[in-house]
Amino acid sequence: MDNKTIEIICQEETLQLDYRRCIYWPSHKTLLLADVHLGKDNIFRQHGMAIPEGISEDNLNHIRQLLHEYKPEQLLILGDFVHAVPSPQEPWISSLAKLIHEFSSTVFTIVSGNHDKPGTANRLPDEINWTNVVDISPFHFRHEPLKTESKTSDKYTICGHLHPCITLSMRKGPTIRMPVFWVSPEQLVLPAFGGFTGMHTIRPSRRDKCIGIGPDSLVELRSQQFTIPIRGTTRI
């Protein structure tokens, strides 16, 4: 059975979760992802670490594949598109410009994250729309999750920032850390999209739902144990 994507119903809207760490919102033809951290590999190499070249270009190629497949009207990136203000010579910047030119009918919107420092926009193509939050009913898109006590919007929050994962204790074999889509009654946190990012172990409550991401499929997790693969549509 194919579990590369699943559908959930959130705030009466259909969201399609993809094992490639993104979400497609069909009714608004919007592709969502978060925490790409372009240029992080270059920064580590500058500090003498033996990090392979081409990781940022690979991330852009993964985005290209998704744009070809979903053909969205908007690509909405929920923060930390870059890891730090890039130097003008970084090769992935020209790759990004080619990508934007190739998909000129797609609106590229980035919600600024804590790594998207002032000055970043000046180094990247002018076609990118930068903003702090995006409100498209019934959703409130931002980078960092909202604390319940500081919630300022009556809309359902969709965000990134945490790089959420679950630690799974198997009966036989070692424990593993699995990236997840973390879905709670108040907000949905996307996994980190970038191929060179860390993960943060979360502690979901009983009312939360975690969708684990494997190499080529998705699986629903409950109580830090595997369950059967998701079938059909899940209502949140």
Image (cartoon, rainbow, N blue to C red):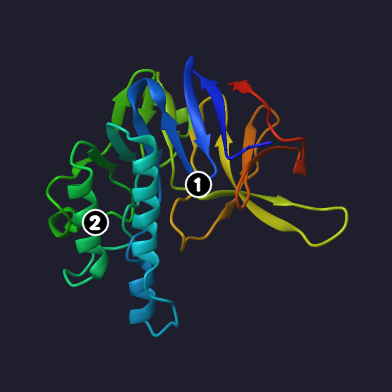
User: Where does the image place residue 197, in percent across and percent down from the top left?
Assistant: 47, 60
Q: Quadrant of residue 217?
A: top right
Give the percent coordinates (x, y) of residue 91. 24, 69
- On the rendered structure, is 35 left or right of 136? right
**Residue at x-position 27% and y-position 43%:** 110
Q: Residue at x 40, y 46 (%)?
A: 34
Q: Amino acid at mark 2?
A: Leu
Numbered circle sitting on residue 96:
2
* Circle on res. 128: none
Label 2: state its secondary structure.
helix
Other-residue count near label 2 (Cα within 10 Å), few / some / many at <14 / 14–19 / ≥20: some
Q: Is residue 95 left or right of residue 63?
A: left
Residue lying furthest top: 12
CB contact under 8 Å: marks 2 and 1: no
Whether residue 78 is visible: no
Q: Position of residue 236 (x, y in %)?
A: 58, 21
Residue identifier under label 1: 20
Q: Is residue 45 above or below residue 3?
A: below
Q: Quadrant of residue 9?
A: top right
- Residue at figure coordinates x 38%, y 48% from the top left: 65
Any part of residue 129 in sight? yes
Distance from the alpha carbon under mark 2 to that under mark 1: 19 Å
Between residues 66 and 50, which one lies in front from this camera angle?
A: 66
Q: Position of residue 51 (x, y in %)?
A: 44, 77
